[in-house]
Amino acid sequence: MSPALSTIPLLLGAIAIAACSCRAAEIETSESQAILAQIRSPEFPARDFSITDFGASPNADSTEAIAKAITACHAAGGGRVTIPAGVWLTGAVHLLGNVDLHLAKEATLRFVPEPAKYLPVVLTRYEGIECMNYSPLVYAFEQENVAITGAGTLDGSASSQNWWAWNERAPDKPALQAADRKQLDQQGADGTPVAQRIFGAGHFLRPSFIEPYRCKNVLIEGVTIVNSPMWEIHPTLCTNVTVRGVTVHSLGTNNDGCDPESCHDVLIEDCTFQTGDDCIAIKSGRNNDGRRVGVAAENIIIRRCTMKDGHGGVTIGSEVSGGVRNVFVSDCQMDSPRLDRAFRFKSNAVRGGEIENIQVSQVKIGRVARAVLSVEFDYEEGAHGPERPVLRHVRIENVTAESCGSVATITSFPAAVIDDVRLKDCTFHGVEAASRTQHAGSITFENVDIEPVRKK
């Protein structure tokens, strides 16, 4: 360990230098390989249904033509609904089983930012609570074998003049969405039947961009996604999901890049994220409603991804009431002065949730502004609630950083559990400040080299 370690206090909680057996590493590798063996991308018949054959015209509203093409493709037993080169305007797109929505190179599917285009309401989750709300821009409900592929662009048309304005606060009044979000929180707490939690017209809860809901065998590959109203890729309660080679560039409010929520068997690989919020955020429902649904997010592989701007590179939470387990992150790169944290865990005494078996390895960090590791168990409601968030069995190995605000920032409360978090074989250069902790629990360092920033 570098002599420089003594010049920067590390963690005020429990810190030890301990060995981690080779057998444990072998088990973790076999676990991730077993998960990968379960994930298979859907395949589609070699049939194409061009939207132009169903009446679509460039730079004109093609909503109806796209819907007709999807219906015809599904009825024929499946294939590709193709979006040719050019700009095509649309409202909500609802995918059906065995349909691959394929965007040609230089094709842009531009979603009109008119809320009425995303009605009638559909079953969705808004920040982890089920409700009936505006349709996501691309939506699939209880379908099997659905995909969005190609080298084209999905443009949500969101800006501070439309969708994003719903969450902008004025000096003398709250954001437009504030009252609706408070109402939904109360409905979730009260156990109001989901069918009665109706938002949509006259309300201000923004839709996600892409949301397969209760689907099986999902593929999102190759496309570029820009200007989302809210979360970008939001598979919810899905099984067997692959997100591959996708580029996300959307810097609006709450613009998370990819949010697998209560999903099982997920692969996210070779993607690039430049976002207005967390790049990847793993979730499992919020508060009582997340516990009511009671489905964890588990068996998730993240590899060879690039994280640029964002609040967190890989985040778990804050909607985590159903729990998260078995997450493996490897061979990723993170670098931006506007990337706040590399690995982020968020919950509180209202959300609770158990987060366990998280393995991070071979991640290269250029610049991260605040901390490499951040645990925020005081997020929003803080310690004011009956639940006990848990974080345990976390391995962070072979991670390097060239510049960071601090190595770790951990804020928690006495009832929460942080146990068996280990950093091993890591090197952190250019560390600007001491790590800060509160009720940090058990944190172990082994062969960790910390070098402070050199003062000029």
Image: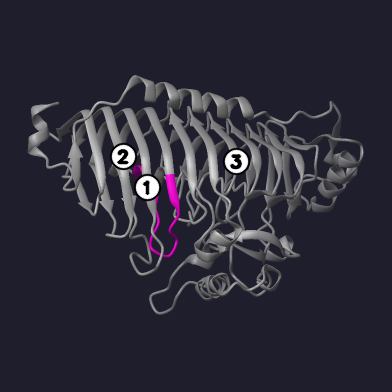
Q: CA distance from mark 3 to mark 2?
A: 24 Å
What's the residue at 65%, 31% (across, down)? Answer: 151
Q: CA distance from mark 1 to mark 3?
A: 19 Å
432 or 319, nearer to the observer: 319
Q: Which residue is mark 2?
A: 421
Tag shown at residue 177: none
Identify the image's colour scheme: rainbow, by chain, secondary structure or one colour. one colour
- 211 vs 428: above or below: below
Query: Dot 2 lies on which element?
Result: strand
Disc 2 residue type? Val
Return the x and y of residue 27 as percentages of the image width and height: 44, 24
Disc 1 residue type? Leu
Q: Which residues are magenta?
A: 340-355
Determine if the magenta segment contains residue 345. Answer: yes
What's the residue at 31%, 39% (across, down)? Answer: 421
Q: Which residue is mark 3?
A: 264
Other-residue count near label 3 (Cα within 10 Å), few / some / many at <14 / 14–19 / ≥20:
many
Q: CA distance from mark 1 to mark 2?
A: 8 Å
| Label 1 close to label 2 by CB (< 8 Å) | yes
